[in-house]
Image (cartoon, rainbow, N blue to C red):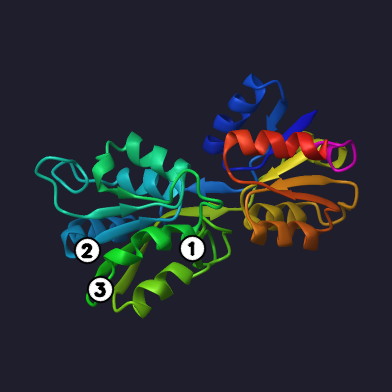
Amino acid sequence: MRVIVTRPRQEAAQWVHALNDAGFEAVALPLIGVLPPPDPAAVAAAWARLAEFDAVMFVSGNAVDHFFASKPAAALAFAGEGATNIRAFVTGPGSLSALKRAQVDIRCIDMPDRAAEQFDSEALWAVVAPRMHAGYRVLIVRGSASGDGSVAADKAVDGVGRDWFAEQVRAAGGSVEFVVSYQRRPPELSDADRAMVRQAATDGSVWLFSSSEAIGNLVACCADQPWVQAKAVVTHSRIAQAAHKAGFSVVCESRPTLAALMASIESVA
């Protein structure tokens, strides 16, 4: 069966490769584009002030990659021996992999257990809440929608700007600041892409969504396309709600691990 992987290009390539190796016919249709930060000076300023924070929460792998692309050569944060004592918070394995690529010491990282039912802010908060106290300072590194200046405080969950994690930090007496390390933009679909969309909406292909924003971009780009015959596997309940709202009649919620996703894909085939 064919699986349409809708993640941003870099992450989509990784999932397509893994799914093809597992015997699926997976193709990438990135529905979220990723651009450099709108204000590189703000990212540089965040690096300059990093020692003021107790922890940095990264909302996605893209947030990690683009933040560390601006890392000064002399910065010691997260580097192990001689590093400043700053924690790195992430919600799941994808962001963890990005931190490892950035050579962040694993001992500096907090994330939900790999056996957690969901990889989201709620699961992360259950891990880091005991660290919180009055005056605890958190920097949240996130993305913005290009062209409108809006920001998504928790793209790792659903890409629509949830501030839940920041609210928990503040309620515990901590303080939160934000920096935008990358921009998100709608996809630029070619004629071939649009032809694939029309076919995949009706031929039994399984759409794989890890973001509500991707669903919104798909619907906006293909406004006249009905989705009543389409099948979707999604990685969070909020994304499932977005898929149902878009018109997908078959929606299966899955843990965002490869094994769970493959089982879910097979279950809706």
Name the spot of residue 101 as percent of width and height, x first: 34, 34
The residue type indicated by label 3 comes to His
Q: Nearer the viewer, residue 76 or 85?
A: 85
Mostly what secondary structure, the magenta segment? loop
Q: Residue at x 60, y 43 (%)?
A: 7
Residue ID for mark 2: 53
99 inside magenta stretch: no
Instruction: Tell me the residue that label 3 is attached to.
Output: 133
Amino acid type, mark 1? Glu
The disc, 1 or 2, on the residue closer to the chain's N-terminal end is 2
Distance from disc 2 to disc 3, alpha carbons, whole Å, reads: 13 Å
The magenta segment: 200-205
Q: Which mark is residue 140?
A: none
Nearest the eye: 256 or 149: 256
**Which circle, 2 or 3, is nearer the viewer?**
3
Quarter of the image with the N terminus in it: top right
Residue 156, position as x, y percentages in the image: 51, 55
Q: Is residue 16 left or right of residue 170?
A: right
Contact flag, marks 1 and 2 (Cβ < 8 Å):
no
Q: Which residue is mark 1?
A: 122
Q: Is residue 145 left or right of residue 170?
A: right
Q: Earlier in the sequence, mark 2 or mark 3?
A: 2
| Residue 157 percent coordinates (x, y) | 54, 57
User: Residue at image x 9%, y 44%?
Assistant: 82
N-term-proximal mark, 3 vs 1? 1
Q: Amino acid at mark 2?
A: Phe
Image: 149 above or below 5: below
